[in-house]
Amino acid sequence: MAKIAIIGAGPAGIEAASILAQQHNVTLFEMNDSALSNIRDKAFLFPDFSSADTLANTLESKLQNPNIELKLSTEITGIQKSGNGWTLTDFHSQTYLFDRVLLTSGYKVFDARRKEELGYGIYPGVITSLELEDMIKKGNILNSVGDQPKTISFLQCVGSRDEKSGNHYCSKVCCVTAVKQAIEIKKMLPDTNVYVFYMDLRMWGKGFEEMYRNSQEIHGVNFVRGRISEAAATYDGKIQLKAEDTLMGLPLNMDTDLLVLMVGMCPSEGTKTLTKAANISGLYGFAESVSEHLNDNLTKAEGLYVAGACKRPMSINDTIQDARAAALTILQNL
Amino acid sequence: MEKRYWNEYQKAIADDHYFFERSCIRQTFFPGSEAAFLNILRNELGKDIYDSSHQHTCTGIGYHADVVPFETTMTIVARLFSLMAEKGYENYVPSCVTSFGVITEIIEKWNENPALLEQAREYLRKATGREFTIPKNVVHPSDIIYKFREELKGKMKYQLVNRFTGRPLRVVEHIGCHYAKIFPKHGVGNAEFPYVLAGMIESWGGEVVDYPERRHCCGFGFRQYLIQENRGYSVANTQKKFESMEPYEPDFIVANCPGCTMFLDKWQYTIAEMEHKTYDKNGYGIPVLTYEEMTGLLLGYDPWELGLQLHQVQCESLLNKIGIKYNPNNKYTGASGKILPSPDKPNVLKV
């Protein structure tokens, strides 16, 4: 039996661990004090509005295997090739030796404060998609003064496809997430007007286009093709938006109770640190595989594998599939 | 918790030994401001600043109005740099925000395209026989006041506090487009929430008003006011700002651009005549100051020496709020002691 380390107990880490542990000893490192925080912070999942907690519970049950050791609150800060294996170092400087390492250290969301013109961190009526998700999960969507919002506006591509912030890539999941959240708002607050400002909507997955159509035809969500250039608080606590409706060819100035910024996916700090240490750092600090076509879980560092959103923005479903592929790749190479 | 992400963003601002470039228009609009700045630097801060009698335009207004070609502007700026170099200075301080924008733009172009720099050297040599060096540090005077704001605070007689209520004065700050919107990296605090004037206001006891149209154009945009037919657009821009700031009841406005200061001031008269609308509840309008005037007032300089009587919106209400002592009889007394004629009174805006 080989000793395999997996760094990051998200959906990729747990799915890969459950497969590898059928034949080998797996140690799963997680810097937080619980696994799957990036799923448990969501209410429902696209495109079927299934419960995020149910998926998290199912994944977590896969850890019930004596060959899996889950080490919570253990941040891996160092990685080094050591003979035929790899030495990992945690934040207490304790070292561990493994035959193979799978990096599933995932992503963090873009820090919206960097887009200062959108007022996040300055005006309480400007929130991120994660904060809205938390409101949806608690069943209590309120504006900045504690009232039921009459208008909620979404802005797509905050920190994605954005030259100013340096992130030229698409974060892939934000378009459909905004559509999902817009529908959830309309289900909870039918009288609330919902606007989604977008550059173009990338409905790439199964059922996504149908969601987008239903959001308009059934739920009455308004889509405006145009970027918001500026958000500012008004005297009565609303958010004033300046935008351009590029389909109408007109500038637009409107007030909204909540502005929801669809924050993109960036490599987590762990991903950036470890890919740099192992010399597998690619564009923007994401992990780089040998080939996206045929060897997407292999890296140029022998014995070090990658899976999930540490490579690039990825949906939960794609992450789980990628983790299974990574596990298979490791088994083939042992 | 409110946080302005770029507040901490600072640019390099030289400590001493500055070459001063005067503005074409500021001495007409606000005749005391440049003199106050030189006085503050030399006598309050003990700095060395050189004020050349051989200087000339930067061509900024003509350049942005498309009547002066870039090559001419570049060569004229090169001559200004040659004046600086021959006096042994390396730190360039253009009084006007548009000059600041023109100069930072040209240096940026020279950095990006060295062939243009060689062209400028050749043109200047052929036209004047002069050589020049690029300044090591280009800053706007408001940057320097900002840098030394705490030192100046120790010398100030007054604070930005309403002496009747004890509350901080509510101040609208407005940054010229050419200060930080061309190159955000050249503005203290960047472009969205610039901190150069806000830092002065906060250090000196005031409260910055954050209103929805804070970043909106003052109405000065060259193409709007240079062409008479476009001036309605200019007034409309200014009006939009005033409508937005009105509910916050600001005590005064401070700006670091000659155009912003003048148009935010003078258009209050125009809007009052056109719309019968003023933006303070007593009908006097909102006073508009340059940052040198604000600094000078707090240091105890005489308001009439600073030239505040030449503003459209009169400043007595503000002086009274701060508690600044002044002699109303000297308002229209010339330097020779002669009593000058006072201006006509507007129909709507009270003075």
Image (cartoon, grey):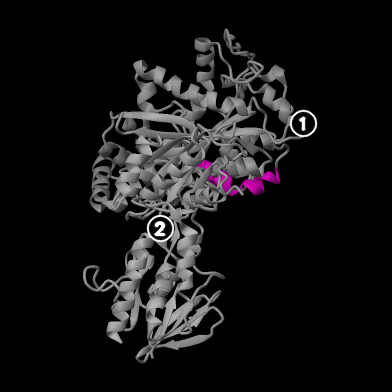
Location of mark 1 (residue)? B165
* Percent position of residue B69, x then y: 26, 34
Label 1 CA crowd tier, 10 Å (few <14, some 14–19, many 20+): few
Report how far apart the C-alphas of labels 1 and 2 lie in the structure: 49 Å
Instruction: Specify the subunit that label 2 lies on.
Output: A
Front residue (pair A323, A119): A323
Location of mark 2 (residue)? A265
Front residue (pair B50, A224): A224
Say if the magenta span includes residue A211: no
Amino acid of disc 2? Met
Q: Which quarter of the figure is the C terminus of chain B placed in?
A: top right
Which region of the structure is painted magenta?
B140-155
Q: Quadrant of residue B329?
A: top right
Instruction: Specify the subunit that label 1 lies on.
Output: B
Say if the magenta span includes residue B144: yes
* Percent position of residue A178, x then y: 41, 46
Q: Secondary structure at mark 2?
A: strand
Residue B131 falls left or right of residue B171 = left
Residue B276 is marked as none
* Percent position of residue B58, x then y: 37, 36
Res. B189 visible in picture: no
Q: Secondary structure at mark 1?
A: loop
Amino acid of disc 1? Thr
* Percent position of residue B279, x then y: 59, 20
Residue A29 falls left or right of residue B110 = right
Res. A325 visible in picture: yes
Above or below, A70 against B164 in this view is: below
